[in-house]
């Protein structure tokens, strides 16, 4: 028996070994370690609504010791007195935004054709803003942090496996139809660096927004123009440790499937590493080929995920979120320097690729774009429009003994307005367009100019709470110009 | 885990697709054919700079060599570089009439060695194929002798051709062993 077993194993390994290894013989390459990076600096002129708010989070902002704030606005001048409607922090229009990153890239190749490597990307864009209240517990905006870190093993016949903190197959690796290879990316580009988060007017719903949660990714070789891939992430977080600050199950715990206040984290908490998303899986099929001289790429894919339960009362877990359930199709074509692309996404997700609350509407989004490359000059434009779960709708409220679904009747702050939301559901409509151009000064170095308009609209919800009345629309206009260097 | 069935299904599907992938031969998808969220990589792709830019801090950067070769000949030399170089070295004592690295042909001019007055030689060498093999080079030596005022063809010793080939092969071996440590 033992002999047979050994014999069988030997035969199998011989067959597999011969089939897998023999035809792929190629020159072995010792691993190389490469250091590259990028730097960019843009001047931006920003014209946005919601530039009059005072404290958004309610935490003191402005006074050393963090004990005071501007009083809230009210028709009578607010609790601190003063002129009605004048208790505001003002934002100017000019800024310069710089960012840099260093990548460490390892690549190697074995004699049997297997290639392997790792990428560790460090960048300085990890911290969006600060508050005085976190005086010595927060870091500066220039702090370097790890963005992506992953390793890969690829074989000509079996395809590639990536593992680590990296985007999934539908989170940017295999998508088609997102045309953003001009300017800084048009409506999905760097304009966001200049706009404050008030009124939710800062975030577009692009593939990279799904995040680099620690995951495992498989991507196949290409057969008859088709390749496919799948990825799985156990939760929304990355990094080394499990994230639990102590033995309590909190939203920061990677493995928590229920935690107190989960209902608040369909969207990532301000800053990364706390979201209710669990067991995220993505699958994609892509076709690339040439039709009458036009290069075509098309992708269809799916993103699914569960969500952590809310556990506000002991012994009670409440399922407050819909599962993530997203379909996306996209196609793009290139001919003689022109690239045109379009993309359609539909399913249960909010504008931040998060889980929607139970009972809320699904989202849908269309993105179209085009660009043209002529020598050192690239010009392009893109446009996005979508309808998403609104914020002014039924929600789960802690009544002291249970989580109860409650109608949101009051919006705005300071009791300035109380429009009723009669059906308990709401939609947020978001659209934006960007137009941009690059001039390539040298390989890797671009001069860039770009203009982006972005708009958020939600009936009955006040998107600029510190102005009188209900502003159910917010918008941003950003013109930026500057230089970018990658090496 | 909230949806073990779905996850298992997905893993199963991936595995079966992997097996399928192994059965027929596909084309390997390069890393630069996937999308990326890296600001560096995006900028490099957008500006047409190779993603092999940057500073190599460890190891030897083969990609630049390959790029240089590709630029020089649209895919590099079509014959083995060691054999080609060795043949040139070996025949360098004679004046060169023509050398075609793509066809692999080297033709020398007539040459009269100082110790053999009234006798001259010409050689034609063919380097064949990309592999470094003992039959990858063929050398044909022609001989003429002076009769009165005229050069007249005369047979060269048959051993000369194979001796020249052996010299080329041993020189190629030297060149290869010198470059192995790179």
Image (tube, coloured by chain):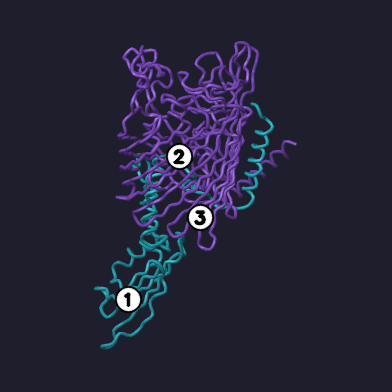
Chain colours: A purple, B cyan
Q: What is the x, y in percent for residue A4?
A: 73, 40
Which residue is at the far right?
Answer: A1
Q: Is residue A112 visible?
A: no
In the rendered image of this protein, does residue B47 appear above or below residue A163? below
Nearest the camera: A297 or B99?
A297
Q: Residue at x 43, y 63 (%)?
A: B78
Mark 2 against mark 3, which lies toward the viewer? 3
Residue receiving disc 3: A333
- The Cα–Cα distance between marks 2 and 3, rounded to whole angstroms, is 21 Å
Residue receiving disc 1: B121
Q: Residue at x 56, y 45 (%)?
A: A344
Q: Residue at x 33, y 72 (%)?
A: B98
Q: Is residue A347 visible?
A: yes
The count of marks equals 3
Nearest the camera: A178 or A453?
A453
Q: Mark 2, chain letter? A: B
Q: What is the x, y in percent for residue A83?
A: 34, 18
Quarter of the image where the N terminus of chain A is located: top right
Quarter of the image where the C terminus of chain A is located: top left
Nearest the camera: A234 or A352?
A352
Nearest the camera: B9 or A424?
A424
Mark 2 against mark 1, which lies toward the viewer? 2
Residue receiving disc 2: B37
Say which quarter of the image contains residue A6.
Answer: top right
In the rendered image of this protein, does residue A162 appear above or below residue A243? below
Badge 3 crowding class, 10 Å Cα cut-off, few under 14, some 14 to 19, many 20 or more, is many
């Amino acid at each position: 028996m033992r002999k047979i077993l050994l014999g069988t194993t030997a035969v199998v390994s011989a067959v597999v070994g011969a089939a897998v290894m023999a035809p792929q013989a190629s020159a072995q390459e010792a691993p190389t370690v490469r250091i590259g990076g990028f730097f960019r600096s843009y001047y931006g002129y920003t014209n946005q609504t919601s530039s009059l708010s005072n404290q958004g989070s309610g935490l003191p902002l402005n006074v050393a010791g963090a004990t005071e704030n501007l009083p809230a606005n009210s028709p009578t001048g607010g609790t601190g007195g003063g002129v009605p409607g004048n208790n505001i922090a003002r934002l100017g229009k000019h800024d310069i935004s710089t960012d840099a990153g260093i990548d460490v890239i390892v690549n190697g190749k074995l004699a049997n054709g297997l290639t392997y490597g790792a990428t560790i990307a460090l960048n300085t864009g990890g911290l969006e803003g600060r508050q005085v209240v976190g005086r010595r517990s927060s870091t500066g905006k220039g702090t370097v942090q790890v963005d992506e870190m992953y390793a890969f093993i690829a074989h000509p016949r079996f395809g590639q496996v990536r593992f680590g903190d990296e985007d999934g197959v539908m989170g940017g690796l295999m998508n088609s139809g997102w045309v953003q290879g001009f300017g800084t990316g048009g409506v999905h580009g760097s304009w966001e660096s200049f706009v404050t988060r008030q009124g939710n007017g800062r975030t577009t719903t692009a593939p990279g927004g799904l995040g680099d949660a620690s995951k495992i990714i498989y991507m196949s070789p290409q057969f008859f123009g088709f390749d496919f891939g799948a990825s799985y992430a156990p939760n929304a977080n990355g990094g080394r440790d499990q994230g639990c600050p102590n033995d309590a199950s909190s939203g920061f715990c990677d493995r928590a499937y229920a935690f107190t206040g989960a209902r608040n984290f369909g969207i990532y908490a301000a800053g990364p590493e706390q979201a209710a998303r669990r067991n995220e899986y993505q699958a994609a099929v892509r076709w690339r080929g040439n039709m009458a001289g036009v290069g075509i790429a098309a992708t269809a894919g799916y993103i699914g995920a569960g969500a952590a339960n809310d556990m506000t009362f002991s012994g009670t877990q409440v399922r407050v979120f819909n599962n993530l359930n997203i379909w996306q199709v996209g196609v793009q074509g290139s001919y003689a320097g022109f690239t045109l692309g379009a993309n359609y996404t539909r399913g249960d997700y909010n504008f931040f690729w998060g889980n929607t609350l139970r009972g809320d509407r699904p989202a849908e989004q269309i993105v179209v774009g085009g660009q043209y490359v002529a020598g050192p000059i690239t010009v392009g434009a893109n446009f996005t429009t979508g309808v998403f779960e609104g914020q002014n709708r039924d929600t789960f409220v802690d009544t002291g003994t249970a989580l109860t679904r409650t109608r949101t009747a009051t919006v705005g702050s300071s009791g300035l307005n109380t429009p009723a939301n009669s059906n308990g559901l709401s939609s947020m409509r978001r659209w934006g367009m960007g137009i941009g151009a690059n001039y390539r000064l040298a390989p890797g170095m671009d001069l860039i100019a770009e203009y982006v308009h972005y708009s958020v609209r939600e009936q009955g919800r006040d998107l600029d709470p510190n102005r009188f009345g209900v502003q159910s629309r917010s918008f941003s206009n950003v013109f930026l110009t500057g230089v970018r260097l990658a090496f | 885990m909230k949806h073990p069935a779905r996850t298992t299904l997905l893993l199963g599907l991936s595995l079966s697709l992997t097996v399928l992938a192994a059965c027929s031969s596909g084309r390997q998808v390069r890393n630069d054919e996937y999308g990326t969220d890296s600001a560096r990589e995006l900028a490099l792709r957008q500006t047409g700079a190779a993603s092999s830019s940057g500073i190599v801090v460890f190891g030897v950067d083969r990609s630049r060599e390959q790029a240089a070769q590709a630029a020089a000949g649209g895919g590099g030399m079509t014959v083995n570089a060691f054999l080609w170089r060795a043949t040139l070295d070996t025949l360098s004592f004679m004046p060169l009439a023509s050398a075609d690295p793509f066809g692999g042909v080297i033709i020398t001019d007539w040459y009269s060695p100082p110790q053999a007055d009234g006798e001259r030689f010409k050689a034609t060498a063919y380097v064949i194929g990309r592999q470094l093999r003992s039959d990858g080079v063929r050398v044909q030596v022609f001989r003429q002798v002076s009769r009165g005022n005229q050069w007249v063809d005369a047979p060269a010793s048959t051993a000369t051709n194979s001796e020249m080939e052996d010299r080329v092969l041993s020189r190629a071996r030297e060149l290869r062993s010198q470059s192995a440590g790179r």
